[in-house]
Image (tube, helix red, strand yellow):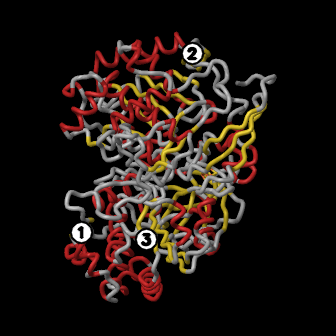
Amino acid sequence: TRDPEAPATTTPTHCVYCALQCGTLLHRSGTDVEVEPSPDFPVNRGGLCQKGWTAPAVLNTPDRLRTPLIRGADGELAPASWDDALDLVVERLERVRETYGPDGVGVFGGGGLTNEKAYALGKFARIALGTSQIDYNGRFCMSSAAAAGNAAFGLDRGLPFPVTDLGEADVVMLAGANPAETMPPLMRHLVRPRLIVIDPRRTRTAEQAALHLQPAPGTDLALALGLFHIAVAGKHLDEEYLDTRTTGFEEAWRCALPWWPERVEQVTGVPVEDQERAVRMLAGADRRYLLSGRGVEQHSKGTDTTAAFINLALALGMPGREGSGYGCLTGQGNGQGGREHGQKADQLPGYRMITDPAARAHVAGVWGVDPDSLPGPGRSAYELLDALGTPDGPRALLVFGSNPVVSAPNAGHIARRLASLDLLVVADMVPSETTELADVVLPIAQWAEEEGTMTSLEGRVLRRRAALTPPPGVRTDLEVLHGLAVRLGQPAERFPTAPRPVFDELRRASSGGRADYAGITYERLDAGEALYWPCPESPDGDHPGTPRLFLDRFAHPDGRARLAAVEHRDAAELPDSDYPLHATTGRVLAQYQSGAQTRRVPALMAAAPEAHVEIHPGTAARYGLAEGGLAKVTSAHGSTIARVRLARTLRTDTVFLPFHFPGAGRANLLTGAALDPTSRMPEYKVCAVRIEPWREL
Ligand code: SF4
């Protein structure tokens, strides 16, 4: 309720933002909501980061969208009724479909959507629109780690063990992850272990590390091959484990053989003694983990880089053992669940491949449609956005839970593509840089206004609960999909508006799949059970779930993990005389993703108010830049304007820009579109730039 007379309530739920999914208690009185950390949720143990503490501010933000908007003949967005907006959307979708066929319509989802919404969105695209053209922004997040994890272990679950296991470790290697800023409560579990941090920046996490390896951007793969080389040459291998639990060592070793430490130092800049110390620390510890993050994953060779770090972990016998392992620190709130339920271009619910006839038959059976009517695989996220408005690409796009004008790479180009569409429909809770381009804007409910489930980075399924009703005029995403599907001629019961029946259907659709949710129910979650997938159906409905994967065998048919044969290659763009510096992008503590939510929170804006570029003082002096001045940063793709911050934490050949800011300060105006050949991950983490002072006109 939003009734000021209604008794105050306290609702246990989880944070709106990142994949740590900290447990929270929401105290509501009228429309006022305050948050406190839930004292007994093991992941955050009574802690929250600044974003979590201030999350309720977005619920009542003054510019909250409260009515559908339709762009009129004058080019302005004007309020409209829901019926008018949905009728118009469907009329124009039908026109596009008649002219260009079903693939003339695209759907772009998000890693923040609940499991129920991600599932319903994939189903809506495949059977209500009949399009293959669906993907989501999670492709930009952890898809390289997912691809490498699937190849190595036969199954990808961010952390195949509970977060709390990390607290018992002796050593943790963080490859391209900065949890001290991106998910601070995780650091509570990293107090005991000695940390090895691999990052071109001396981040807050690196400052807490026993050892910081600071490679040049785009060279992590060479470093990983070098660490593997040292592990072999130094006789640190776990021979018995390699013999009994893995295949592919010889091929992997052949690739790593030429990466002797001095050559690695030459390419990466990481001193030989630091490389050797890192391997000794990891190999010498009883309980050790290797965790990857976006820093090594968001590259045009992100899958191979992650695979090379997995090779190292396998060589040392780490994965699939209690007290040791490899995991990926998934970023977005439902980055894990979002990739399991069918909003990926190549997948159906249950983490099934859309090209697998058995998977198609199973899911089509649950949906009550002919398997042959299901489309095949579509384009990956960047390729989908890049194709918009082109002769072969979609002419209409529906966007749910994403703001690609800020978050997509090569953002200036993508904004032009979006603007060229016959129809752009954006469902969002607040105006964003993408709603500014939309023909129709649909106002939707927020995290604390609706029920559902999320799957955290450790594969634990969590209940998200409503603390208050949505404001008048606002609908949930499930209601929006229902309204569109019915107008497109689908039976109403095929697209329920309540999350629970959607989840029950998701359970059936996932049953027998790689991410099996069949044994997980709202009742069990509400009773406080900690359920990690896979959790298949069992006769008594009490399967305990699987907190730790791979303890007996990996998920490949022969039970063995695969080492990968991977070769180093350069980043797509290297510095040259025109663009002499590396630029790398990332997050800061007080903002989240495209900033559409966090830029509306006064406390967060006070902490991180505008686009900035971090640069070493020596480099800044070379280019005539001073602390607090404005700089123009230019790559082959575009230019951005940002406030200069001098930081000795940077390499002298590298600048860093956070990607949360809009307009001329968008870091993604600089990033390019080189894609990883396997995961289709764009190269967010490195591009070549020049920098110069900028004076406002
Ligand atoms: Fe929310 Fe992530 Fe911060 Fe936890 S760490 S409070 S989930 S943003």
* Viewer-side residue, 400 vs 113: 113
Label of residue 589 in the image? none
Query: Label 3 CB, ligand 1: below 8 Å?
Result: no
Q: How many marks?
A: 3
Q: What's the amino acid at mark 1?
A: Ala
Question: Which residue does the image show at 31% across and 24% down from the upper left?
Answer: 127
Q: According to the image, label 1 marks what residue?
A: 565
How packed is label 3: few (under 14 Cα within 10 Å), some, or many (20 or more)?
many
Question: Which residue does the image show at 46% across and 47% down from the upper left?
Answer: 335
Corner quadrant of residue 149: bottom left
Marks 3 and 2 in Cβ contact (< 8 Å): no
Q: Would residue 687 be seen by someone viewing this image from the given angle?
A: no
Label of residue 324 in the image? 3
Q: Would residue 651 be seen by someone viewing this image from the given angle?
A: yes
Would you say 313 lies left or right of 372 here? right
Please tell me whether mark 3 sits on a helix, a strand or a loop.
loop
Would you say 405 lies left or right of 573 here? right
> Is residue 487 placed above or below 639 in the rendered structure?
above
Q: What's the amino acid at mark 2?
A: Asp
How packed is label 2: few (under 14 Cα within 10 Å), some, or many (20 or more)?
few
Marks 1 and 2 in Cβ contact (< 8 Å): no
Mark pair 1, 3: CA separation:
23 Å
Would you say 644 lies left or right of 87 here? right
Mark pair 1, 2: CA separation:
58 Å
Please tell me whether mark 1 sits on a helix, a strand or a loop.
loop
User: Quick one: label 1 or label 3, which is nearer the N terminus?
Assistant: 3
Label of residue 74 in the image? 2
Corner quadrant of residue 374: top left
Query: Label 1 CB, ligand 1: below 8 Å?
Result: no
Which of label 1 and label 2 is nearer to you?
1
Which of label 3 and label 2 is nearer to you?
3
User: Quick one: label 3 or label 2, which is nearer the N terminus?
Assistant: 2
